[in-house]
Every structure is written in C-alpha cells, then in structure tokens.
Amino acid sequence: MIKHQKSKTKICAIVNVTPDSFSDGNQFYNSDKAIEHGLNLISQGADILDIGGESTRPGSTLISSQMEIERLEPVIKGLKRRTSSPLSVDTWKSAVAEHCLALGVDIINDITGLLGDPNMADLIAGSNSRPFFVLMFNPVLARPEHTSSQHFPKFSINGNVSAFNTTEYKKISDMPILEVMKYYFDKALTIATKAGIKKEQIYLDPGIGFGLTKKENLQLINNLSVIHELGFPIFLGVSRKRFLINILQDANIETDPETESGFTNRDLASASLTAIAASKGVEIVRTHTVKEHLLAARIGEAIYQADLAADLDLPRYKD
C-alpha cells in the first residue's frame, strides 16, 4: 500500500430493510421508503449503498433466505432503476447472495467472512460479475463461548457452529484479540484462495461491535494498520456501535436516542471515528448518515495525505 496515494475514503451508507435493526429498525422497513431513503443518501454524497434484510444485532432472530430475498429484491430493483451508484448487500447466506448478484448488485458484504455458509466462497468465485467481497472477522464465530458473544445469533447455516475445531477454539480463547483476528483472516483467506476468489476482489472488515469487549473494539480500531499490512483494503463499520455510546456515557454526554441531542451525539461520535479511519487510510466506511461522515472523511484524508498538501500561508480570518 502507498501511504500517500491520493484517494478518498468512500462512504457506504446503510439502508436497513428490517423491522428490528438496533438503530433505525422499522423506519425504512417499507420498500418504497427504503428506496427513497437510499436515493436521499446518494444525493447527500454517499458513494455506495449497503442494503440489509436481516438484523444481526444482539438478541435478534435470524430469518430464512427466502424471507431475506423478499425484503431485499424490491429495494434492489427500485434502486437499480433509479441510480447507477454501486449497491452492496449485507448477507452471509449464499442463496441470498446468488439471488442479489443476479439482480445486479456489485458487492457482497459477508459478516461471517466465508465461515458461516460453506457455499459462499464457490458462489463468489464462480460469479461472472466478479463482485467485490467484504470478508469480515466475526468474533462471535471465533469465540462462541465468550461472554460478549452470548447474545448474538449463531451466524451459521442450520445453526451448526463449526467454523473451527475444538483444538482451534481452545487456541483462540487464549489469544489477544489482534491475534484472533489474524488467525480468523488466515483461515478465511485460505478458503477464498482455494475457491478462486481473486485478491483484488476482497476487502477486510475488522468486525467492530460483534462479540467484543469495549477494550477489544478500541484495540482493533487503534491497530487498523494490521489489515493494510496483510495487503488488503479496509471496509470499516463503526456507525452507532454500542461501545461508542458507552464512551459518551462515561463522559456524561447525552446519548438517549429519544432526545434530539442524544441521537445527534451518537452520529457525531460515529463521525469522529470516520475521521480517525480516514486519517489511517481506510478505504470504505459504513455509516447510517452521510453529511457528518463526509466532513469527517475529508479532514481525515487531509491528515493522511499531509505530505501532498499545498504548502500555503493561510489568509487571516476577516474581522
């Protein structure tokens, strides 16, 4: 990776078509509302839309592939008719991914990183459209017995959690979180390579907010360079994550989403992380809103590309 390459951090805006998303559940559940919301996000400057038909928050219940397809299809079709912006689908199920690729989506965002559905790797490798593929580190699959994983769904076809064997689970349980992430990526990327997925198709996601402690979330963000050192671009989702809310609460900052200031503060905190991500060269950030994140990304990029900045004497403020 060239550290000072001129490129912008892309904003991938979220369109949830779910009745129970933790942050905007039911607000855009109707497909017409979801389409209009997506178009509005693009008009505000989003580069990509990430459409999700299944909630994966703690306490959520997984749905069938057919139900997920029924939620996603009208939204994808409606957006494809009205925008040429790239579309991503947030799914870990190969049957859903296959259907959505046939509808023309550009990216499959797999929160299990190929370890949830054994057919996903062959599907992506065999697709003539050569989609981009987001391969996420999923600590819930890596450490299913960890306290932080207990309230999440199992993220596995037929509920069969078999991403790692017993020896691997024991080994992982004694590792610091950065080593767990690297171990997970090594296993998933081996699967991807064997299936024939090209390296240039892959983005890696550190899995912020999935079965992690507050400290582990912060450690992964503080060490995003590890992913670049592996030779892959980064897809980062931190918007409205619970550990962010906890940080604000510890600082006695309003976080109640029922109040205007509480809801706004959550997005401002999320945008702060986008600025940090952009200053570390992160290629794509996944966000619920656009305006705050665009501003944050441009500032972060300027810091990342400091050596390329014009060496200007800035004019004084007008009196």
Image (tube, grey):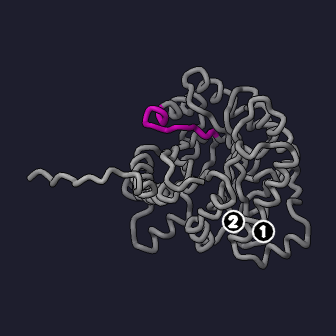
Q: Please report the residue visible at 82 percent of the width from the left and 59 percent of the height from the top.
A: 187
From which residue to which does the magenta span run? 40-51
Image coordinates for residue 130, horizontal then vertical, percent: 74, 34
Viewer-side residue, 135 vs 317: 317
Q: Is residue 7 above or below residue 155?
A: above
- Nearer the observer, 36 or 5: 5
Residue bearing the label numbered 2 = 211
Identify which amino acid the numbered label 2 is placed on: Gly
The residues bearing labels 1 and 2 have C-alpha atoms spaced at a distance of: 8 Å
Q: Can you say whether 284 is above or below 187 in the image?
A: above
Give the side of residue 256 with respect to residue 74, left or right: left
Residue that label 1 marks: 143
Evaluate if marks 1 and 2 touch, with contact meaning CB atoms under 8 Å apart.
Answer: yes
Q: Position of residue 24 (x, y in %)?
A: 54, 47
Secondary element at image label 2 = loop
| Residue 67 lies within the magenta run | no
Q: Secondary structure at mark 1?
A: loop
